[in-house]
Image (cartoon, rainbow, N blue to C red):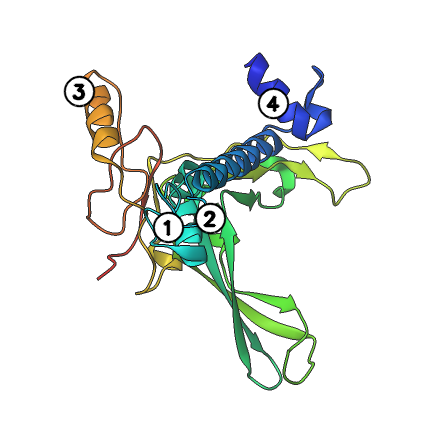
Amino acid sequence: PTGLRAAVGARAPHFRDHSQQDAAEFFAVAVDALSDEMRDAARASAARSAAPDGAPLRPALTAAGGSGRAGAEEGESTLPVPQNFGGEVLKTMRCFKCGHEWRRCEPFSSLSLQLPAPAPGGRRAPPSLQSLLEEHLAPVSLEVTCERCGHAYAALTQHVSKLPRLLPLHLMRFDYSRERLLKRSDAAAVSTALDLSFAAHSETAPPPLASPKAVSRSHAAAADGHRATTPATGGGAEHGRKRSLAITGPSPH
């Protein structure tokens, strides 16, 4: 733990001391740092493997994706961080005035979920992670300039275009809407599975397949008495097992 904190602190100095910090931010910084360092190491390894004339002798990074820039980019997508945490949301905006639609894809490694407003008197059943996730990806009206007519508002719909193998969820517990910063202690109902089919479509990509070794290790852990659930599926296909919340999605076919 000390070494990990020191490594994260080198990237974000406010994590160097023993003061209380946000765990979700620590996770995000750690994952980003790990991703950057492994990508740089893979690129350096590929460069060292090149012959004097520039032809790869041992294409370490491009082995999974062919050769050249496209192969290198695809090879980077097979590194541990994008393999495990790499998800993608397709956002579609439709102008309220002219009906023009445009899209953009946004990668994510975790999702931050907003807690509902406190109920009067504090009496309300704890929201489920499923309901918070559905609210996070629900259609909304968005203030954004239409690229065709310049109108200021559009309808936003979101679909998960690529399912991650693991999906960290962060509950936003700080209330910034009041006169002072308040940390909420609301309970949330945690289930053993999350269903993402409501936000998927026929072209949603399933999570990357787990390696045979990883599957064997996790099956051995399950046989040893540990709970093992599928963290993400494309609908019935076996993608390996890991101790995590199960995330279900649509069939890729």
Labelled pair 4, 2 in contact (Cβ < 8 Å): no
As drawn, is 19 to the left or to the right of 139? right
Q: Earlier in the sequence, mark 2 or mark 3?
A: 2
Q: Nearer the viewer, residue 248 or 33?
A: 33
Residue occupying image coordinates x 64% and y 78% = 147
Q: Position of residue 34 (x, y in %)?
A: 52, 32
Q: Is residue 191 visible?
A: yes
Element marked by disc 4: helix
Locate residue 119: give its quadrant: top right
Amino acid at the residue labelled 3 = Ala
Q: Of the two numbered discs 1 and 4 on the same chain, state the one appearing first in sequence.
A: 4
Asked if residue 125 shows in the view, the reply is: no
From the image, tell me which residue sits under label 1.
Answer: 163
The tag earlier along the polypeptide, 4 or 3, is 4
Q: Earlier in the sequence, mark 3 or mark 1?
A: 1
Residue beneath disc 4: 7
Q: CA distance from mark 3 to mark 1?
A: 27 Å
In contact (CB < 8 Å): disc 3 and disc 1: no
